Structure formats: C-alpha cells, structure tokens
Image: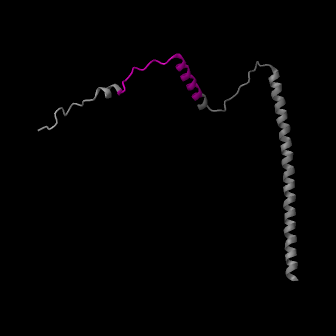
C-alpha cells in the first residue's frame, strides 16, 4: 500500500523553523508618519488641481495694488505696440527682399538668354 510512512505530515528542522519569518502585529503609525501622510495627500491633491484658477480682487483692498496693476498693463500695452511696429517693419523688409529676389531671377534669365544667343 503506502510505501512512505508519514506521507501527509511535513517535518522541518528546528533551524529552518528558527529562520522562518514570523508575522508581527503592525504597529500604529506615529504622529510624524501621520503628518507625512497628510502632507503627501495634500501635495497630490494640489498637483491634481488645474493650474488656472480664477483670481478675484478684493474690493476693499487698497488702491496701491490697483495702480501697480495699471502700470503693468500700460507697460504691456507699450510692449505690444512696439511688437506690432516691429512686425510691420519685418513685413516691409520681407516684401522688399522678395521683390529683389524676383528682379534677380529676371536678370539671371536675361543673362542666360543673352548667353544662348551668342
């Protein structure tokens, strides 16, 4: 019948049993660990939020901030005007370059035609 006695039982050496990992009861997290977890959670939620949030200006705020914003707006408007003028200048230069290239092509064509007649 059964050739091996104790077939169903598994015996292990005491040395192997001493090496075996034992399950330990999990310790409760310390307050520092809890603080770190909450900081990590808030960082994640802050990253998940959209970067563009509506900014509302306090009506009762002092007028100094408003004047500074107006100065910045005036500066940006001046910058926009300068950029527009620069763009117009670039467009004019581009137009003259294209006209000069067209004239050069015509001159080259005339030179080629003159060489072929000779």
Find residue 74 and report its horizontal and vertical position in percent: 85, 33
Find residue 9 and report its horizontal and vertical position in percent: 21, 30
Residue 80 higher or lower than 105, as above or below: above
Of all residues shown, which one is farthest toward the bottom?
A: 118
Say which of 110 and 33 sits in front.
Answer: 33
Please give the name of the residue rendered at 32% of the width and 27% of the height, measured from the top-left corner.
15
Please give the name of the residue rendered at 82% of the width and 22% of the height, measured from the top-left corner.
64
Picture quadrant of residue 4: top left
Residue 29 higher or lower than 19, as above or below: above
Q: State the count of labels.
A: 0
Please give the name of the residue rendered at 14% of the width and 38% of the height, measured from the top-left corner.
3
Find residue 32 and report its horizontal and vertical position in percent: 54, 18
The residue range painted magenta reads: 19-45
Picture quadrant of residue 13: top left
Is residue 30 covered in magenta?
yes
Of all residues shown, which one is farthest toward the top?
A: 31
Which quadrant of the figure contains the C terminus? Answer: bottom right
Find residue 107 and report its horizontal and vertical position in percent: 88, 71
Please give the name of the residue rendered at 87% of the width and 55% of the height, measured from the top-left corner.
93
Which quadrant of the figure contains the N terminus? Answer: top left
């Amino acid at each position: 019948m059964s050739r091996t006695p104790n077939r169903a039982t598994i015996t292990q050496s005491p040395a192997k049993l001493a090496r075996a990992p034992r399950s330990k009861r999990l310790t409760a997290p310390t307050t520092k660990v809890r603080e770190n977890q909450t900081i990590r959670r808030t960082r994640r939620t802050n990253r998940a939020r959209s970067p563009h949030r509506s900014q509302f200006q306090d009506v009762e705020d002092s007028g100094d901030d408003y004047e500074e914003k107006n100065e910045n707006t005036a500066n940006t408007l001046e910058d926009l005007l300068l950029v527009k003028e620069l763009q117009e200048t670039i467009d004019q230069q581009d137009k003259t370059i294209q006209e000069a290239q067209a004239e050069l092509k015509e001159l080259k064509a005339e030179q080629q035609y003159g060489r072929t007649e000779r």
